[in-house]
């Protein structure tokens, strides 16, 4: 079988969209149909320190990367510490409507200028010897300045990195010659127009340090292939093998449908069982609600989600079941 003809069991994600109760967002109908072949990736890509160092130099110090949300730094003087590899970047609300980003290091002895995110006060002051900078990166004060006659204040500014924002997300780039964020994102913003990310906010931020190569962690959250072995309890309510994967230039997406059973189940769950699995109900627990006769768990879940958001989203009926 040709690679492009390979197909998992069951219906496709597009088949599921055909059964939606509401008009489907055209962006969900796009398919990249990219064929990447089946060549193997050398294990050294995950174990080699030399290759990791090369990634730091050629990737993390070159690409635009999400550092924080604008609401993390709403007021002048607010700072956000973004660490990547062995670099620390300080994102600062330098003025109303203005965000800057600097290498997070004091120019005197190289101590980290800010250890934690938060309000920096009137100036950003190093906790070692008290050197301080204004929020725009210009020098504010050198204690005992008489002892530093060689320092030219106008040249003693914090080194900046590129910073820009889209949809409320703040991005930084350490490469001064990098293309603009707009160019780098390409068509990605058009994929999110319906969901208006600029109007969203961070409700909670959960982080965990994983003792592995970054690509192992990234890949684990980029596919649903592992569900059958790692999360078998959710198989009645996730179409893991019905997932659709697309890649367009600098971005890709994985769409895994919920409230529909996995094609790998050896038994056929009822719509009630699909719903109960989706709502994490065990066999000895009463269901949250009874699925009406003739209704599907997927449509019922979508209808409930619309009603829960109706008071906050004026165009909620424009959203499909996906």
Image (cartoon, rainbow, N blue to C red):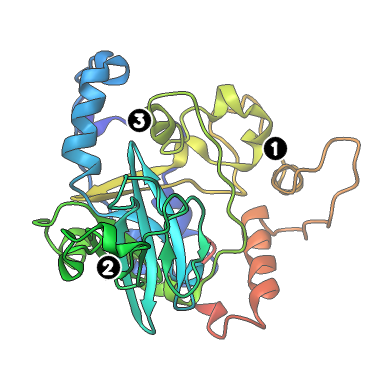
Q: Which residue is mark 3?
A: 215
Let me know if residue 274 appears in the view. Answer: yes
**Location of residue 293 in the rendering, given as x and y in whole percent from the top left corner:** 77, 58
What is the x, y in percent for residue 194?
41, 73
Please give the residue where the numbered disc 1 appears in the rendered image: 269
Picture quarter containing residue 309?
Answer: bottom right
Which type of secondary structure does the marked residue at label 1 adopt? loop
Location of the N terminus (image quadrant): top left
- Say above or below: 1 vs 29: above
Nearer the camera: disc 2 or disc 1: 2
Left or right, residue 56 beside residue 228:
left
Judge whether residue 41 can be spotted in this image. Answer: no
Q: Earlier in the sequence, mark 2 or mark 3?
A: 2
Q: Residue at x 76, y 46 (%)?
A: 276
Q: CA distance from mark 2 to mark 3?
A: 25 Å
Left/right placement of residue 278 relative to residue 92 reads: right
Q: Can you say whether 174 is above or below 203 in the image?
A: above
How far from the left and from the top, in percent, is residue 116? 51, 53
Which of the two labelled residues, at mark 3 and mark 1, occupies the earlier sequence position? Answer: 3
Q: How many marks?
A: 3
Residue 139 placement (x, y as % from top left): 28, 68
Can you tell which of label 3 and label 1 is closer to the viewer? 3
Q: How far apart are labels 3 and 1 at the CA level? A: 35 Å
Pick the residue in front: 186 or 269: 186
Q: Secondary structure at mark 3?
A: helix
- Give the distance between the C-alpha atoms of the residues marked 2 and 1, in whole angstroms: 48 Å
Q: Which residue is mark 2?
A: 164
Left or right, residue 182 beside residue 287: left
């Amino acid at each position: 079988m040709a690679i492009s003809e390979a197909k998992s069991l069951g219906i496709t994600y597009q088949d599921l969209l055909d059964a939606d109760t509401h008009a489907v967002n055209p962006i969900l109908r796009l398919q990249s149909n990219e064929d990447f072949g089946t060549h193997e990736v050398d294990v050294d890509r995950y174990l080699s320190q030399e290759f990791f160092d090369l990634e730091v130099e050629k990737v993390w110090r070159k690409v635009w990367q999400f550092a924080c949300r604008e609401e993390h730094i709403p007021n002048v003087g607010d700072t956000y510490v973004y660490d990547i590899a062995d670099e620390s970047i300080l994102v600062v609300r330098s003025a109303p409507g203005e965000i800057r980003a600097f290498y997070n290091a004091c120019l005197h002895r190289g101590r980290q200028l800010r250890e934690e995110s938060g309000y920096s006060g009137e100036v950003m002051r190093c906790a070692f010897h008290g050197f301080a900078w204004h929020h725009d990166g210009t020098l504010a004060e050198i204690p005992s300045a008489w002892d530093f006659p060689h320092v030219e204040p106008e040249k003693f500014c914090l080194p900046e990195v590129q910073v820009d924002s889209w949809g409320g997300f703040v991005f930084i780039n350490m490469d001064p010659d990098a293309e603009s964020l707009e160019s780098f994102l390409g068509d990605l913003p058009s994929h999110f127009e319906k969901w208006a990310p600029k109007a969203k906010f961070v409700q909670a931020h959960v982080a965990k340090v994983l003792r592995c190569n970054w690509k192992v962690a990234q890949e684990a959250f980029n596919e649903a292939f592992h569900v059958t072995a790692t999360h078998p309890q959710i198989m009645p309510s996730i179409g893991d093998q019905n997932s659709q994967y697309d890649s367009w230039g600098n971005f890709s997406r994985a769409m895994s449908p919920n409230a529909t059973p996995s094609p790998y189940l050896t038994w056929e769950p009822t719509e009630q069982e699909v719903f109960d699995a989706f709502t994490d109900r065990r066999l000895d627990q009463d269901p949250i609600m009874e699925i009406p006769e003739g209704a599907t768990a997927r449509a019922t879940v979508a209808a409930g989600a619309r009603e829960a958001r109706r008071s906050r989203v004026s165009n909620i009926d424009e959203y499909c079941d996906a």
